[in-house]
Amino acid sequence: MSADEDLDLPFYDDYFGPNKPLALSDIDTASINSIDSAGSESDLIRQRSVRSRVDHARRLWKFNYQEASIYLQEGGNNDKFDTHPHSHKALPAYLLVHQTWFYVMDLAVSLLLLGLALFEPPAFYSIDIAIHGSLELFALVLLGVELGLKMRWLGPKAFATHKRTMIKTVTLVVMFAEAIIVLIRQKSHIRVTRALRPIFLIDSHYCGGVRRTLRQILQSLPPILDMLVLLLFFMLIFAILGFYFFSPNKDDPYFRTLEDSFINLFVLLTTANYPDVMMPAYKQSRWSSMFFILYLSLVLYFLMNLLLAVVYDTFLGIEKSKFCKLFLHKREAAERAFRLLVSRRNPSFVSWTHFRGLMNHYRPGKSERDVYLAFKAINTGGDGKISLEEFYRVYEGARFSWKHEAAGAWFEVWKLPTPLFIAAKGIYKLVTHKFFEYFIYLVISVNGCWILADTIIISNDDSKSPADVEVTWNAILFVTIYVVEALLKIIGLGAWTYFHSGWNVFDFLVTVAGIVGTLGQNFDTGGDLDLTFHYILVLRPLRLLRLFKVKKRYRDVLGTFFALLPRMVSVAVALLIFYFFFSIIGMEAFNGLPLANCCNGTSLADYYRNDSNSPQFYLNNFDDILRSGVTLFELTVVNNWYIIMNGHVAVTTKWTYLYFMLFYIVTMVVLTIIVAFILEAFLFRIQWERKMDESIDDDRIEVSVSISRDEFEIHFPQPWIQQDTITLADSLQTTDTVQFRGVRMRTRDDLSTQMYRDEVKDWLREEAERQEMELRRSDLEAESENICREDRSNTV
């Protein structure tokens, strides 16, 4: 902190709620300045008094920096401000729980609880009950400690009103009691509550995307449920009609009862039993086919696609609403942080000193040089002070990674000898020429055709096996061309520029794989290692993906794919959570069923017969967690899923239908939402490019910032502390200004901000009106309270 800011106090100092230390905030500038006029005091006493106040001020600023960084984290993570530490005493618990090692521990404990399903009865691999029971108890205790720390910083009232935390607490208490009972009895019992273990994984820090996905699924449920009711209504109508039309036919086993009619029409919705379900009626009368054609046309092709349209429309509204709330939430977080960083001398701006103090807590891994560059990138006015409007961009500015921007290409900066300089410059011109790129595309196309031709020849020759393929001269030629291409680009563009491109990294990895596979196939090592080299060599066709860069439509598809990858991971984890939930219930209800040879004398007998000539469907069971997962995936694919369902029904009761039908409905809803994800992401990209009249092939945002020698001397009084400031000091010895380039990845929020820029203005205006109304209401309440207080005092 600079000398003139040592005694400057925060303008707002109500940190960590109402329970702030009193002495620090009540020091005003006048009382500090009055020290100099106290002539009767000795110099030593005055120095001690000033030093004491300076220490108080610095301590107060440190608390403000901490709280401001917490506000920014809450804004970025979309955490409600209700979870903000309620007092200074709660701060240690908050900081402990928000440490990286604590996040990792929480995730590991959650995964441990899920993994115990492998060893608990019915087990994939059995271990002593005392071992898995003790591990479960240990994991639950750690989760209980985390909840205790959370209650410490939230306070009992906020803790009790936080829904997700209360659900987690109740689940933890029930599971803790069950684990103790299992250890005491040394015997497991029916434990359906194990299906709730994913709650702990969902609540972990690293599963924020999964929480958002599940929240979107829940928010999309109302219109989905309406459509499902409509769907089931039509199915019931057709089931009644089918019963009356086809039950008189004694040879038709599908419509003997209303229950049979409904279940078989439900299966027909997936087309898994079509045309089997129609054939007995079709044999009796050809006109009966009209019933099934009408049913499939209405229910499958119209209502199911209408369901997708409803889900997509709902999803669009949710996406825009979610962006609006997150946008305003981050702005409010930035406003709260800003109020803690302005001082009494500068109540409208954040200085460099206080911005640096903030970043020491918000981004502790950033160097002082990078923090100053972020400060300059945010300070678009260039006056050395960040206003509130500029501070709103703190999230974007903090994400830039900075690198020295040379005045030219790398070979111009390094001052190479003339022959090397000429060679490097010539290579640079070569690899940046469009005909070089076209030549590589041609080579890739020829290579792809050659691989396809070789594959066709091998597949049609019974004497050859794909695993016995030898490396031919053309494979060596193509790998050599790719190696030369990579080396030329690295030399011409420079290593940093080359590896900063995702496509170049992809090409490099495929080239390295080709080299390893080619060399490995030329050496007969024997055993599994030869097979490994064979599989590496098979990866050569992956390079054909590069051809998608040629056509814009393909680039849009690939761009959508890469943009969706993080969200698809979250969706996949959410789907696995549903699988785990149904797997546990399936194991508790159906494990150990005698499915082999279970259905003799029925149409299912051939599927469940225990011999090598049958499909062996008895292996699709719930005898352990892994088998359950495979069985549920087969149900998701819906091919012959009704055979698995009917087999389980045959050895249990008809209530089993509910389990399988409910699982199908849940997976259908989730998969429909996945399709809505893909549609929304692709159409958003297309609409953005049309509206902005700009392509988003480049997924990076770059900004250029310079540091002058005068700035360096003012803001970096101790440049020898960090390596990058030492390098910067050396660069400023030969030039007056050093240019830096900041790069960060373009996010969906960046695109949405531009896409909805007109709506953003309306949101900001509505938010300002709402805040003004709340301020007026609070003023009226305060005025009313004062009037009541005066009336009571007058009465007394």
Image: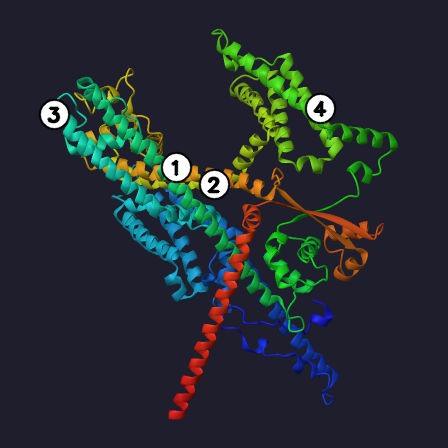
**Which element type, helix, strand or loop, lies under badge 3?**
loop
Report the residue marked by disc 3: 248
**Mark 4 closeness class: few <14, some 14–19, many ≥20 residues within 10 Å:** few
- Residue located at (41% from left, 58% from top): 147
Residue 209 vertical placement versus 46 (above, below): above
- Residue 140 in the image, given as x and y percentages of width and height: 38, 51
- Residue located at (77% from left, 31% from top): 428
For residue 696, which quarter of the picture? Answer: top right
- Residue 468 in the image, given as x and y percentages of width and height: 53, 13
Q: Amino acid at mark 1?
A: Leu
Q: Amino acid at mark 3?
A: Pro
**Which element type, helix, strand or loop, lies under badge 2?**
helix
**Which element type, helix, strand or loop, lies under badge 1?**
helix
Residue closer to the observer: 631 or 185: 631
Q: Earlier in the sequence, mark 2 or mark 1?
A: 1
Q: Which mark is residue 484?
A: 4
Q: Are marks 2 and 1 in contact (CB under 8 Å)?
A: no
Residue 589 vertical placement versus 435 (above, below): below
**Which element type, helix, strand or loop, lies under badge 4?**
helix
Report the residue marked by disc 2: 680
Report the residue marked by disc 1: 671
Mark 4 vs mark 3, CA separation in Å = 77 Å
